[in-house]
Image (tube, rainbow, N blue to C red):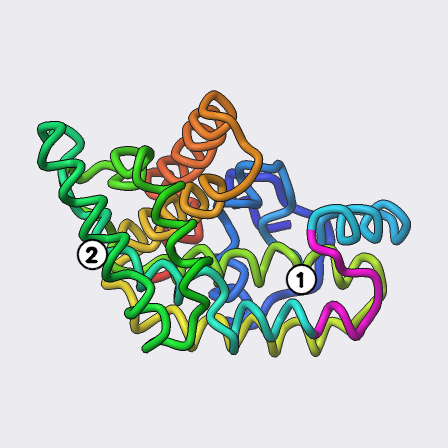
Amino acid sequence: MVDFGFKVLPDAPALTARQERGLALGAVYAVGDDLPINALTAGSDPQSAAKVLEQAWDVYDAQSARATYRFLLEEGGHRDVYACVRGYLNAGWDLSRADERARVEQATREIPAIAMQRGERPDVALNYFQSAWPSRAMMQGHYPRRIIESIAAWDAARVVHVSRFIVDAGYLPADEAWAAIDAAARMVLPEYPSWEEFQLGFLAGRVFWQCNGTFDAQEVSADYRRYTSSGKSLLSKADSPWQRLPW
């Protein structure tokens, strides 16, 4: 058994270089959720995996599993709507009330047109801005006053994460899941210069998604700390895939 210093699955099939790199895209989930870092599985029985997929992803068979892959890989996931609002979030959180009001008013006027140009629903994009604006400081991660350019990392990591449960549930064969992970790698690699930036993209994407959901501030903060810690572990431990594999 290879000792990664993280949770591993004993006697897991050897990974190809491509598979190892693909799994590394979802490593922050593996570390944060205590899943095997060396195999495409969550370690779940089919019934448990199916329950997770139904409740968290609205996936219940092969057709809906493939629809989820299309959403994440071909239909833009959350990264396209993020692109509609990103420029308006990239402002300090210590604005005066007048400046903040002016910024929000400008975004409210302009975001719908930007969304239409990008093929996104104006109301959805505007709702995301209005939800994300109060939490923009958190989305700036470790770099004050800078919103990350792309949250493609968030969509790519989710491809890996959902693939674990899709395979465990038996909805799709492993080969098809690996093909989706390969597509995620091709999609995300041009977006970042390093694993450090990939991690920031993941964190920003997750917060962006949560801001438009039913999470409260305490949940979002706890979740952010959890996956920040996972990323720091991956970026610092010598036996981490993020250390062993160049971006």
Q: x and y percent of residue 105 in the render?
A: 21, 47
Mark number displayed over residue 83: none
188, 96: nearer the viewer:
96
Quadrant in which residue 32 is drawn: top right
Image quarter in which the C terminus is found: bottom left
The residue under label 1 is 163
- At 44% from the left and 59% from the top, the residue drawn is 123
Magenta residues span 57-66
- At 22% from the left and 44% from the top, the residue drawn is 104
Disc 1 to disc 2, C-alpha distance: 32 Å
Find out whether residue 58 is within the magenta segment. yes
Find out whether residue 19 is within the magenta segment. no
Decide whether the magenta segment is chiefly helix, strand or loop: helix
- At 43% from the left and 70% from the top, the residue drawn is 120
Q: SS of the residue at dot 2?
A: helix
Q: x and y percent of residue 164 in the render?
A: 69, 57
243, 176: nearer the viewer:
176
Mark number displayed over residue 87: 2
Q: SS of the residue at dot 1?
A: helix
Q: x and y percent of residue 216 in the render?
A: 51, 26
